Image (cartoon, rainbow, N blue to C red):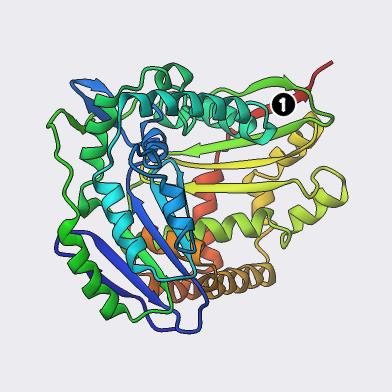
Amino acid sequence: MKKELSKTLPNGMKVIFVEKPAAHHSYIQVSVPYGSTTRLEWQGKPVLSGMAHFIEHMMFQSNEEDISKFFVERQASINAYTTTTMTTYTVLATGDIHPLVDYLGQMLLQPRWTDADVAHERNIILQEQEMYEDDVYSVLTQMSLTGLFPGQAMAVDITGSKKDVAKMTLKQVEAVQAMMYQPEQLTWVITGPFQAEQLYRVMCEQSKTWLRPTRDGEVGYISSPEVVLDGKGATTTMPIQLPKFALGLKWQAQRTRGAAYIKAVLTRQLLTDVILSPLSQTYTRLYAEGIIDESFSSHFVYEDAYSYLLLMGTGDEKSVRALTASLTMSAIKNCFDPYVFDCAKRELIGTLVTMTDDYEAYSEWLVENQLKEADAAIFLTIIRQISLNDLTILAEELFGNPTPLLFMIKGQK
């Protein structure tokens, strides 16, 4: 596979082309740096929670034609998702991608909505929220984030609060879309059997008809920082057989870019793997003692505004106490085995090398790196430079005085 080719269209859109001559299909991703924790105001008041997700849904609304049908008729499928920091639209295609690219560009910049569309989508999302309320892991995850980050944007589900979703209006939705979906905000990653330079020229011509959204000047970013409060654990009940738990730790977020961001992410990933992946002595011991099972997972998040670790699994208070004890510095230092560390590095290198075969994961990774001004080409070099001493320093910073919060869902009696 050739090295990615990065270009900028005349209208300011960034495009990363990934040529795969032997591929049998193409993958198109367009990402906007607007997620559930992006803090905006409209007419002097905070934008309603869940707006990024609501706009994502609204993009599939059109009175003129069936958007999904357009793609299906051209041997393609379209999808989308929203995260805390980004909204992403994806197209998987086996045919000619030129008309798909043109359609997607126009769709994202100049959607045409009505009050009826907004009302319809409000009902759809409220139904979606009810579905999540029945999923134990969705409930546990959101309960954990709400407890870790009280009063902050992270405390609210990506779909928004039911109260805010019910207040969505066409005027506010259009105003926020026009602000956040300006061409220079959009980043494309296109992977497939094409010639990058030729496709770039086609997109340059197509983009001449992609009209820039007209901003009303009433939407802007909230400049004041969020108030950070102490978190609090929580317990609830659901109709489940075995109790589920989450241990949450949070740290002061740091805004890093470039090589510093890459090292911060990789060091945290390696530290988590050395401590609690199936490679580690702690994992092996806890598993053998029945404290954790195959449902156990760890989630380390490192973003500009939020940095936290969630350990989730199946078990009661005894399991939680044993797991908490493994997060002390004395226990962590016992995990710093050179062999395990080397295995963790090799596994991480293998994941990065093979990621290029996963179009979706690789595209998302490229966009995240671009937003963080990080050169994807130096990841492997930085991994090889990370030492056990780097992990020790980070562990002392993160786990020197751990105060994990417990979140638990028990079975209903």
Q: Quadrant of residue 262?
A: bottom left
Q: Quadrant of residue 114?
A: top left
Q: Residue furthest right?
A: 289
Please provide percent x and percent y for residue 67.
41, 47
Amino acid type, callout 1: Ile
Q: Residue drawn at (25%, 62%), measured in percent from left and top?
A: 14
For this view, does 385 lie left or right of residue 37? right
Q: Residue drawn at (51%, 78%), measured in percent from left and top?
A: 23
Q: Across the whole image, how many numbered discs are drawn on residues?
A: 1
Q: Residue drawn at (77%, 39%), measured in percent from left and top?
A: 322
| Relative vertical location of residue 168 with respect to residue 401 in this rendering, above or below | above
| Relative vertical location of residue 249 with respect to residue 397 in this rendering, above or below | above
For this view, does 202 lie left or right of residue 155? left
Asked whether residue 107 appears in the rendered view, the answer is yes
Please provide percent x and percent y for residue 364.
44, 59
Q: Secondary structure at mark 1?
A: strand
Q: Please name whichever residue, 225 or 28, is drawn nearer the observer in this view of the structure.
A: 28
Q: Please name whichever residue, 59 or 219, is drawn nearer the observer in this view of the structure.
A: 59
Q: Which residue is mark 1?
A: 409
Q: Residue furthest left?
A: 217
Please provide percent x and percent y for residue 320.
74, 35
Q: Residue drawn at (36%, 53%), measured in percent from left and top?
A: 31
Question: Which part of the image, by quadrant, shows the C terminus?
Answer: top right
Asked whether residue 8 appears in the rendered view, the answer is no
Q: Please name whichever residue, 76 or 268, is drawn nearer the observer in this view of the structure.
A: 76
Please provide percent x and percent y for residue 194.
38, 79
| Relative vertical location of residue 56 with respect to residue 346 in this rendering, above or below | above
Q: Please name whichever residue, 115 or 1, is drawn nearer the observer in this view of the structure.
A: 115
Question: Which part of the image, by quadrant, shows the N terminus?
Answer: bottom left
| Relative vertical location of residue 380 with respect to residue 213 in this rendering, above or below | below
